[in-house]
């Protein structure tokens, strides 16, 4: 640990510690050449002593120094001083995203989207310069006070993981991609996976995988499926969830291939949260091959110019039709009794079926189903053409066999066949289609009368399908395809179903109904709109309780305020008295109280009293007690010393006292007069009282020492004992004046025996 005042590379002066991590310690420092504050990351000795690591570290740090982007912490310099390797970086006033989440909890959708776009923008700039981070996590993302996010530590992870050192101190395994966990090759898509985990933490407040050891967590990234965020918090945008789940696909090729593609989808969600973003379905342990959209396009392109010739196609069809004939024969029919309708089978074999898939990962107990609103736009996903054809053939065979069996059973009951007789009738060489009919009762007459039958038909029934969770357009199309002709949509509010999707239907799945049955579908128009209670001025706890009771989700952000007391609400987004849907998120802006800024105490020495006052006030400091004293070394009126040492950091408004010089002190003396004065004149000796005033005279002037009054009868001899201070000289003479009771000067009537002595004050 470096001490404050340590100078690195004869340029950077350490001020204090900002933070410490597994690889390094970060200091706030002063760049003495450019006169600016910087952050310096100094490698710990475990890494500094590994030459291989140091070499890679310097190479990667220098490559990242070329990155310039608003969302990347700038690297200014890379250096070494007495075996201490360091990076000089931009000093950002803020906290890490991890600390921000710990303080504020899960973020609002708007803030999470904004943060995700900023991080992805920084990654996009790095990837364009072929710089891969390899350790994206909230701890490596700084949230500045102005809301700007900056990614730091580019290139360091690569240097660390390229060595044979233990990586336990390098990064958090909670954000590692599966290919990194396996020790395989990592690229830009590894950063996208880690960003996906970071986005997951922003919207849920926690990471998807927790374990007792780093190994167990790493295995979870390789093997376990992530719990969809909306299962934890249904208020998360479904479209945002899809973006996150695509970013954290196990296989790199199924993720976003570039940060630019990720940013494009994030902006789509930001502009329209209800947008429908197609996300590649999650990979399971199933051996079935799952294709990306790009794979499907390649297959389609290639299907337009197949490589096998017409003869091979004909051979395949002959084999398939032979299989059908063989299956029919296995049912007990003779070859003469079976004629294969070749044109129909060829039509079925060549038909291209379209499949609807649900590309949206399961998000809640009530899944919103992905159904195309336009049949012509449906695409085939994850379907093996050979498997598709095999299933189709099996279906045809099964239907063919069932039709023959039904035909034989009905024919036997009706007496069409005489099994066991020698006179067998040939059946017609064609495929017979049996329809479901009902027979009416017959009217029986006498033996001479004929029997007549009047068949009647019952309206065919259609099995009801489940369309809850479909979009309204998709639901209507699905019911129309099923054969229903009378469908009505009723709009209802719903807290759980997204606007435009089906909440419920009036008939359950599987019920048999006629085509004209009135099908009533309830379609969501979103949650009910409520008026937001104005909670400004409330405590944060009271405001949260009030809005939660209304049915809103509540999240918080914080800022300093000179006018609003700490922990009280400054404002809300949306504002009070505005409308919002039940379940929407209301963001409280809560006061952190007045910001306690620190300032350096100025040097007041030798300033005049007035200038010292000005210097303190300009630094937002208060003037404390001012005292004065003599000082022969400091000019009169200038500051001798101050109560708080110059350069000390104190809070704004702190009081600073100081002492002002009175200049050099001159010597002064106290003069003491003692002795007696007396008279022999009988007139004054007994009868009259007199007043005696004693004086000392020196080079600076005459000073009155004392005034004595002698009572009548006691005025013959008067004892004198008086002193005076602040005399500028210790040499002088004593004199006196005597006046009678009427004020007449009678000094001449008296003689004195007085002396003066001096002491230095």
Image (cartoon, rainbow, N blue to C red):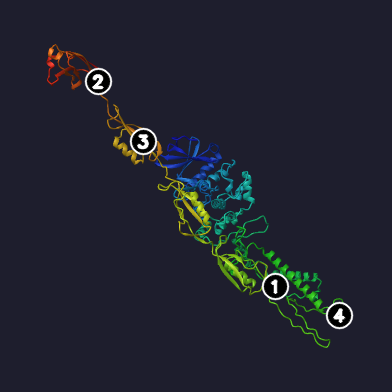
Disc 2 is placed on an element classified as strand
**Given this view, does label 3 or label 2 mark the residue nearer the observer?**
2
Residue hosting label 3:
656
Q: Name the outermost residue toward the bottom.
A: 448
Decide: marks 3, 1 in contact (CB < 8 A)?
A: no
Disc 4 is placed on an element classified as loop
Residue hosting label 2:
669
State which quarter of the image contains the C terminus: top left
Residue hosting label 1:
346
- Residue 427 in picture, x, y percent from top left: 79, 78
Q: Which of the two labelled residues, at mark 3 and mark 2, occupies the earlier sequence position?
A: 3
- Residue 663 in picture, x, y percent from top left: 27, 28
**Given this view, does label 3 or label 4 mark the residue nearer the observer?**
3
Q: CA distance from mark 3 to mark 4?
A: 128 Å
Q: CA distance from mark 1 to mark 4?
A: 35 Å
* Residue 322 in sight: yes
Residue hosting label 4:
423
- Residue 548 in picture, x, y percent from top left: 52, 54
**Given this view, does label 1 or label 4 mark the residue nearer the observer?**
4
Disc 1 is placed on an element classified as helix
Up the image or down, 533 lies above or below 626; here it is below
Q: Which of the two labelled residues, at mark 3 and mark 1, occupies the earlier sequence position?
A: 1
Up the image or down, 545 lies above or below 436; here it is above
Give the crowd class for mark 3: few <14, some 14-19, many >=20 residues within 10 Å: some
């Amino acid at each position: 640990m470096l001490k404050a005042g340590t100078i690195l590379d004869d340029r950077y002066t350490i001020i204090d510690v900002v933070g410490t991590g597994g690889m390094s310690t970060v200091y706030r420092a002063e760049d003495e050449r450019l006169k600016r504050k910087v952050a310096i990351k100094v490698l710990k000795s475990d890494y500094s002593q590994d030459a291989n690591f140091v070499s890679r570290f310097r190479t990667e740090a220098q490559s990242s120094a070329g990155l310039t982007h608003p969302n990347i912490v700038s690297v200014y310099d890379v250096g070494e001083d007495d075996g201490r390797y360091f990076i000089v970086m931009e000093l950002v006033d803020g906290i890490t995203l991890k600390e921000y989440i710990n303080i504020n909890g899960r973020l609002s959708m708007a803030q999470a989207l904004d943060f995700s776009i900023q991080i992805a923008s920084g990654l996009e700039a790095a990837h364009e310069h072929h710089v891969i981070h390899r350790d994206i996590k909230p701890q490596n993302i700084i949230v500045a006070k102005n809301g700007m996010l900056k990614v730091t530590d580019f290139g360091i992870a690569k240097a660390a993981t390229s060595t044979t050192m233990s990586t336990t101190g390098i990064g958090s395994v909670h954000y590692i991609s599966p290919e990194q966990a396996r020790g395989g090759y990592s690229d830009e898509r590894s950063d996208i996976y880690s960003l996906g985990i970071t986005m997951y933490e922003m919207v849920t407040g926690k990471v998807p995988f927790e374990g007792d050891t780093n190994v167990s967590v790493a295995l979870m990234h390789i093997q376990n499926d992530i719990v969809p965020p909306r299962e934890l918090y249904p208020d998360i945008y479904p479209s945002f969830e899809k973006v996150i789940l695509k970013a954290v696909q196990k296989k790199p090729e199924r993720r976003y291939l570039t940060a630019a593609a990720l940013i494009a989808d994030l902006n789509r969600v930001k502009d329209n949260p209800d947008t429908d973003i197609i996300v590649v379905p999650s990979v399971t342990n199933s051996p079935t091959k799952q294709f990306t959209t790009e794979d499907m396009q390649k297959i389609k392109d290639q299907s337009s110019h197949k490589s096998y010739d017409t003869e091979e196609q004909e051979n395949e069809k002959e084999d398939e039709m032979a299989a059908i004939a063989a299956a029919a024969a296995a049912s007990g029919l003779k070859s003469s009794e079976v004629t294969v309708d070749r044109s129909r089978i060829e039509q079925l074999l060549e038909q291209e079926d379209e499949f609807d898939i649900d590309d949206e990962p399961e998000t809640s107990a009530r899944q919103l189903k992905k159904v195309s609103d336009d049949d012509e736009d449906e695409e085939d996903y994850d379907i093996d053409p050979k498997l598709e054809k095999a299933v189709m053939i099996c279906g045809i065979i099964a239907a063919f066999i069932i039709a023959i069996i039904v035909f034989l059973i009905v024919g036997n009951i009706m007496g069409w066949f005489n099994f066991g007789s020698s006179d067998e009738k040939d059946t017609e060489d064609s495929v017979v289609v049996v329809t479901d009919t009902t027979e009416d009762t017959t009217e029986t007459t006498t033996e001479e009368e004929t029997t007549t039958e009047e068949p009647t038909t019952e309206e065919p029934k259609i099995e009801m399908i489940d369309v809850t969770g479909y979009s309204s357009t998709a639901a209507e199309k699905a019911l129309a395809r099923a054969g229903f002709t009378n469908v009505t949509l009723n709009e209802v509010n719903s807290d759980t179903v997204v606007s435009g999707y089906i909440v419920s239907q009036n008939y359950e799945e599987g019920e048999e109904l006629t085509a004209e049955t009135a099908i009533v579908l309830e379609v969501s128009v979103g949650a009910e709109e409520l008026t937001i209670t104005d909670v400004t001025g409330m405590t944060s706890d009271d405001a949260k309780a009030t809005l939660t009771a209304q049915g809103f989700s509540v999240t918080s952000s914080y800022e300093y305020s000179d006018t609003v007391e700490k922990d009280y609400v400054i404002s809300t987004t949306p504002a009070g008295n505005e409308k919002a849907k039940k379940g929407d998120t209301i963001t409280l802006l809560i006061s952190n109280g007045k910001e306690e800024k620190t300032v350096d105490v100025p040097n007041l020495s030798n300033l005049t009293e007035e200038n010292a006052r000005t210097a303190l006030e300009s630094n937002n400091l208060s003037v404390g007690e001012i005292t004065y004293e003599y000082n022969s070394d400091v000019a009169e009126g200038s500051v001798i010393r101050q109560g708080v040492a110059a350069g000390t950091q104190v809070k704004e408004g702190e009081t600073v006292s100081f002492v002002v010089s009175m200049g050099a002190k001159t010597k002064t003396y106290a003069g003491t007069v003692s002795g007696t004065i007396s008279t022999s004149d009988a007139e004054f000796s007994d009868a009259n009282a007199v007043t005696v005033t004693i004086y000392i005279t020196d080079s600076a002037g005459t000073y009155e020492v004392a005034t004595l009054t002698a009572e009548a009868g006691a005025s013959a001899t008067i004892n004198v004992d008086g002193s005076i201070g602040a005399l500028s000289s210790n040499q002088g003479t004593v004199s006196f004046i005597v006046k009678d009771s009427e004020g007449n000067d009678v000094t001449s009537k008296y003689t004195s025996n007085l002396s003066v002595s001096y002491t230095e004050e």
